[in-house]
Amino acid sequence: MGVQVRSFKELDIADYDAIVVGSGFAGAVVARELAERAGMRVVVIEKREHIGGNMYDEYDEAGILVHRYGPHIFHTNDRRAFDYIKRFTAWRTYEHEVLADWYGTYLPVPFNKNSMEIAFGEEKAQHLTDKLIETFGDERKVTINELRAQADPELSEIADFIYKNVFLYYTQKQWGLTPEEVDPSVTARVPVFVSRDNRYFQDAYQGMPQDGYTALFESMLDHELIDICLSTEAESIFDLEFESNEEDAPLTAICIKDVEFTGPIVYTGPLDELFLSRFGRLPYRSLDFAYETHDAEHVLPCGTVNFTVTEDYTRITEFKYLTGQEHPKTTIMKEYSHPYDDPKTQIPYYAIINDENNAHYERYLKLTSGLCNFHPLGRLAEYRYYNMDVIIGRALALADELVAAE
Ligand SMILES: Cc1cc2nc3c(=O)[nH]c(=O)nc-3n(C[C@H](O)[C@H](O)[C@H](O)COP(=O)(O)OP(=O)(O)OC[C@H]3O[C@@H](n4cnc5c(N)ncnc54)[C@H](O)[C@@H]3O)c2cc1C
C-alpha cells in the first residue's frame, strides 16, 4: 500500500482518534501500535519533508547510502525493542568499532587493554592492566571519573593519559565545556574498558536495518489507519488554551481547526517550541555535517574515527562500514559541534543536561501536566539523551497504556 501522505488542509480532524507529532522512533512506534492494536485512526504531523526523524537516511549523488542527521547504529539489551523493529525490516549484523586518532596513531575506543599496549608499550601495559584488574576486576567498564578518583600513582598516570588524550579536547569540541563542567551522566557514557574487546558497544543485539532506516520507517508507518502530514509544524496547527493569561497558567485544551481534540496527543517535538519559547529557549548543542565522496572503496580503517587531540571536527564516519553497501566509491562525514542558537536554520541535537536546564525544562513540562490527553515523549519532548532502543521501549510502554485505556 505505501505510506499515506495527506495535506493537512484537506484533513477532517474529526476522522482521527489520535494525533502524533513527529515521525522519529517515538512517534512512529506509538502511531503503529495505536493503529494496529487499538484500531485507532492516527494522523502523524511531521515538520520535515520526510519521515524517520533523525534516523533518516538517503542515497547521495554518488549512490552511497548516508545518514542525514548523524550516524545511527542500533544496539540494545532490550529484547522487546529489538524484536519489535525486526518485524519491519530484514536486519544485518554489524558491530561498530571506533578508533581515536592520537597524533596519527589509532587507539581503540573505549580505551581498553589494546589501546594501552599501543600507548604505553607491551610491558608497561601488562603491568598497568594487572593493576586495573586488581582494582576494578576484569572485563569491567570504569568511568574516567572513577579512574581519576584513585590515589594510586600508576592508576593516576593512566587516568591522566586518557583524560588528556581521549577526553579533554573531544569533550571541549563536543560540548563547548570542560569534562568537569559536563554532567557526569554524559562522561559516564564513554568508559575505560578493562578488556580486549574492541567493539564500541557490548550489547546483546547489534545491527543495522538491511535496506536502511528510511525503508524501516516506511514499513512501520505503512498502515491503512495511519495518515501522515509532512512539512507541517505542530505550532502552526495547534491552538493552545490556558487556564488564564498568566505566564505559568496550565494548558487546558489543544484545539485544531477550531475544535478541541480530546483523543491522545503524543508530542515528540521540543516542548519549549510548542509554547513559542515563552520562558526562553532550552539550550542544545547542534551539529554541522560535511560530506566527502572519495574514489576509493574505503578511506577509514573502521566505521568511525574520533579526533581526540587534533582537528576542529569531532569525528569522521564512513557509512559503508555501517550499511554494508558495496560500491567502488565511499562517502565520509565530518561532524562539527556548535551551540544551537537559531531554530530556523539549525537542529537541536543534544540537550545540555544540568540542574539549571532541567529546572528550565520542568517549567515547560508543568504547563502540560493538567492536560491528561497530552503525552510528551522522546529525546526532544523529554529534553534528554536517549538511544534509539530506549525510545522504542518508552514508546511501546506509552502505547501499552494508551491501548489499555482505549
Ligand atoms: C548525532 C546523533 C547520533 C546518534 N546516534 C545514535 C546511535 O548510533 N544509536 C542510538 O541508539 N541512538 C543514537 N542517537 C539517538 C537517536 O537519534 C534518538 O534516540 C532518536 O532520534 C529518538 O527518536 P525521537 O523520535 O525521540 O526523536 P527524533 O528522531 O528527533 O524525531 C522527532 C521528530 O519530530 C519532528 N518534529 C519536531 N518538532 C516538531 C514540530 N513542532 N512539529 C512537527 N514535527 C516536529 C522532527 O522533525 C523529527 O522528525 C543519536 C543522536 C544524535 C544526535
Image: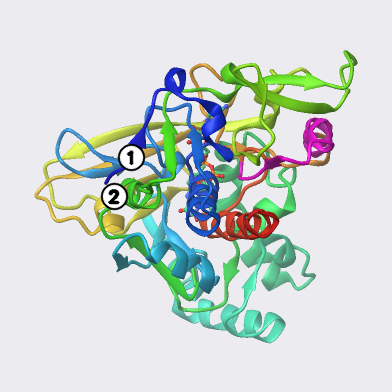
Residue 38 % position (x, y): 55, 55
Q: Which of the two residues, 153 or 219, is positioned nearer the viewer here?
A: 219
Q: Residues within 10 Å of mark 2 (few under 14, many from 20)?
A: many
Colour scheme: rainbow
If you read the primary sequence from the N terminus, does the residue marked by circle 2 or circle 1 appear first?
2
Q: Which mark is residue 333?
A: 1
The residue range painted magenta reads 357-379
Residue 111 % position (x, y): 52, 65
- Is 152 on the left or on the right of 289, as rendered? right
The residue at 72%/60% (across/down) is 145
The residue to which callout 2 is attached is 319
The residue at 35%/50% (across/down) is 213
- Is 30 on the left or on the right of 370, as rendered? left
The residue at 32%/60% (across/down) is 89
Residues marked 2 and 1 touching at CB (< 8 Å): yes
Q: Is the CB–ligand 1 distance for label 2 below 8 Å?
A: no
Q: What amino acid is at disc 1?
A: Met
Task: Give above or below for 23 relative to 33.
Answer: above
- Is 404 on the left or on the right of 109, as rendered? right
Element assignment for label 1: strand
- Is 379 on the left or on the right of 363, as rendered? left
Residue 110 % position (x, y): 51, 64
Q: CA distance from mark 2 to mark 1?
A: 8 Å
Q: Residues within 10 Å of mark 1 (few under 14, many from 20)?
A: many
Q: What amino acid is at disc 2?
A: Phe
